[in-house]
Amino acid sequence: MSPPSLIATPPNLAGAAPVALSYELFPPRSPAAAESLWTTIGELEATDPDYVSVTYGASGSNRNTAVELINRLVQETTLRPLAHLTCVGNSPQELAEIIGELLDVGVRGILALRGDQPRDGGTPPEGSLRYAQDLIELIRRVEQRRSALLCAGKVAVGVAAYPTRHPESPSEAHDVEVLLAKQRSGADFAITQVFFHTEQYAALLTRARRAGVTIPIIPGVMPLTSVRRLTRLGELTGVEPAPEIMERLAAADTDAERTRIGVSATVDLANAALAAGAPGLHLYTFNEHAAALEVLDKLALPRPRSGNRHSRHERLAGRRQLAG
Ligand code: FAD
């Protein structure tokens, strides 16, 4: 008998993949912020995301709170953490130790980043890693040394991608070359910087695919509900918020009206990114759930059935009962 051919595969196996869903959180800076973050985590957990990412201060400024939050996510929730890690200002030895610490607490996804250069214009210490690409290679080396421990699941390494030119880069074409280099060094997927025009995301996909980038490029989308936050983010990232949304938000008479405008604009942006070929959505939550959940509600994403995760919920509830 001849082996079954791929052509004979039932057509439903080749159907469209479900859309991936993830959120970004940052480690809390005070006990009050921690309390409100855990309310947000509970609300987000109920939506069964594929993972939640936890940011990391450049030079490891919040290393302890980041690892503590990740540890609690692993121990106390059903969520899978994706740990951001920056390399600027750290030596390979320091970073190898942090990577080991993350793997020890159960992390299996790391977003490998350079981090922003010191604001005082100073140069990073001698011997510290220079680019995200160097960090990917280091993660893969640490992973290789622990390969026997990781038999049941290797580390997924993500990287940053830029729909608009990175502020230090000479061109968008150079950004794509860098993304390709990160893929060659072992990146499995990319999450984008914020963007305000879908054409920018679609153009990045086209440039990247033409250059040979094959990894998923997941759009990072922020709820467009706050003028203050959009302005601040523009300053931090160098991505100018779209004037139209800024004007419409500023002209709103009430908070409810502002939220309605912002959520609707975010849903349009996300839907257009999905129509352009986005394989998932990564929502920048700023540790608040309300706007993110409203966006999600209106998007009605095709998501996988979560039977497995429900049984994880039940197991966890049992563990909590035993502990309490
Ligand atoms: P790189 O890929 O190293 O690129 C940095 C610059 O160097 C770019 O201009 C690039 O063109 C250039 N470059 C890279 N490699 C080469 C090469 N081989 N030769 C020549 N030039 C090169 N920051 C934080 O501090 N903490 C976070 O948690 C965090 N999370 C983020 C999450 C996402 C999804 C994104 C998009 C950004 C995040 N950032 C975070 C910001 C990020 O650290 C900055 O954008 C930083 O300036 C660049 O990081 P990178 O990983 O893209 O660096």
Image: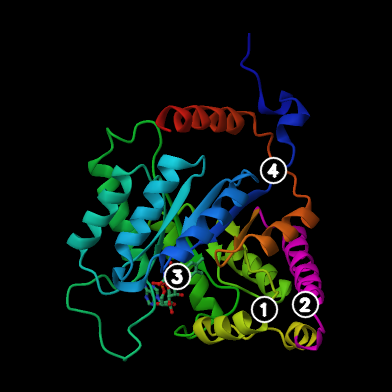
What residue is disc 4 on? 18
Q: Is residue 124 left or right of residue 227?
A: left
Q: Secondary structure at mark 3?
A: helix
Q: Earlier in the sequence, mark 3 or mark 1?
A: 3
Q: Nearer the viewer, mark 2 or mark 4?
A: 2
What's the distance in space between the residues labelled 2 and 1, CA to CA?
Answer: 8 Å
Which residue in the rendered view is the most extreme toward the top? 1
Q: Amino acid at mark 3?
A: Val
Between disc 3 and disc 4, the foreground one is 4
Q: In this picture, is 43 found above or below 64?
A: above
- Front position in the image: 152 or 217: 152
Q: x, y (%) of residue 60?
A: 30, 68
Residue at disc 3, CB closer than 8 Å to ligand 1: yes
Quarter residue 305 falls in: top right
Between 205 and 279, the residue placed more toward the observer is 279
Residue 263 painted magenta: yes
Which residue is labeled 2 in the image?
258
Give the residue at x 69% y 43%: 18
Q: Which mark is residue 178?
A: 3
Name the image quarter holding the N terminus.
top right
* Residue 22 lies in the magenta-colored region: no
Q: CA distance from mark 4 to mark 1?
A: 30 Å
Across and down, in percent, residue 262 comes to 75, 73
Q: Which of label 4 and label 1 is nearer to you?
A: 1
Q: Which mark is residue 153?
A: none
Q: Which residue is mark 1?
A: 226
Q: Is residue 180 visible?
A: no
